[in-house]
Image (cartoon, rainbow, N blue to C red):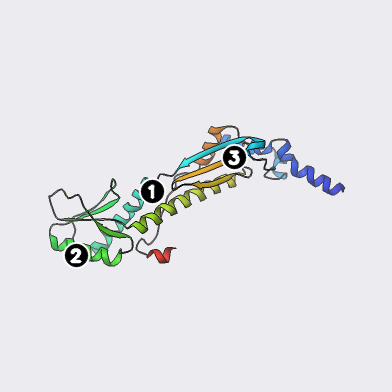
Amino acid sequence: MIGLTVLSVYLLVPTLFGLQTQREEAEISGKTLPWYVHLLPDKGLNLGLDLRGGIYLEFEVELDRAIANKIDLMVDDLSRSLKKENVAVTNIRQDAAHRTIVIEAGDAETIAAAKTFVQKYYDDTLTEAQGTPDGTQPSITFALSEAYADYLDDQIVKQALEKVRNRIDRYGVAEPSIHRLGSDRIAVELPGVQDPDRAINLIKKAGQLEFKIVNGTKPLSELA
């Protein structure tokens, strides 16, 4: 009985004396915690927002920015691949407003060769789209396939969700609730945290979220 009482007190100390808040403040300010704090449990009891109070936050994932970064990688990969195949296009660029890749060349034959290459090696990720040629030279436009665009959107949000969760868990915020809302939003509940700016700074310290796929030509069936 005495042992259970001592154990109960030990587990309750972080909750009763607000050690969780001290840990969060130390993380933001860079201060060193007293030595005895490290001997106690990292987390207190989860009382929830209704009993303990806290903060509810919603974040929007910048899908357009992440997709633009991914298309830039595809443009670089296409440039190297076409050069290796001796397909002498004059320019490959991204049209960020339409999520498309525009390939330009000096003649229609080169454009046809580029089209054949893309259809062979990027058939699961790129599809020919209605272009916006400026009339100066032959060109062809490719857009992300619908299935691949949906896959990227989903994976980007999942990665952002995991980044936020790892950041919060790493620094011991007690029993947070982190979940996805709709297609591009993340909801975060932080029981016991009273300073919104501190909470936001804690999450923002995770740095820029990046989404990378080593081989952009892999079929979606292999990526699932």
Q: Would residue 179 be found to the left or right of residue 140 on screen? A: right
Which-is-in-front pick, marks 3 and 2? 3
What percent of the width, then of the height, locates residue 147? 36, 59
- Identify the residue at image location x=59%, y=47%: 169
- Residue labelled with disc 1: 66
Mark 3: amino acid: Leu
Secondary structure under tag 3 reads strand
Q: Does the residue at mark 2 contact the one at mark 1 (Cβ under 8 Å)?
A: no
Task: Using the rendered view, name the quadrant where residue 190 is placed.
Answer: top right
Structural crowding at the residue carrying mark 3, measured as other residues with C-alpha within 10 Å and reported as few (<14), some (14–19) or many (≥20): many
- Residue labelled with disc 3: 190
What percent of the width, then of the height, locates residue 165? 55, 48
Secondary structure under tag 2 reads helix
Determine which of the numbered discs, if any, sits on residue 113 in the image: 2
Q: In whole angstroms, how far apart are the C-alphas of marks 2 and 1? A: 30 Å
Task: Using the rendered view, name the quadrant where residue 53 is placed.
Answer: top right
Q: Would residue 71 be found to the left or right of residue 131 on screen? A: right
Label 1 vs 3, first from the N-terminus: 1
Q: In whole angstroms, how far apart are the C-alphas of marks 1 and 3? A: 27 Å
Label 2 vs 1, first from the N-terminus: 1
* Residue with the most extreme right position: 1
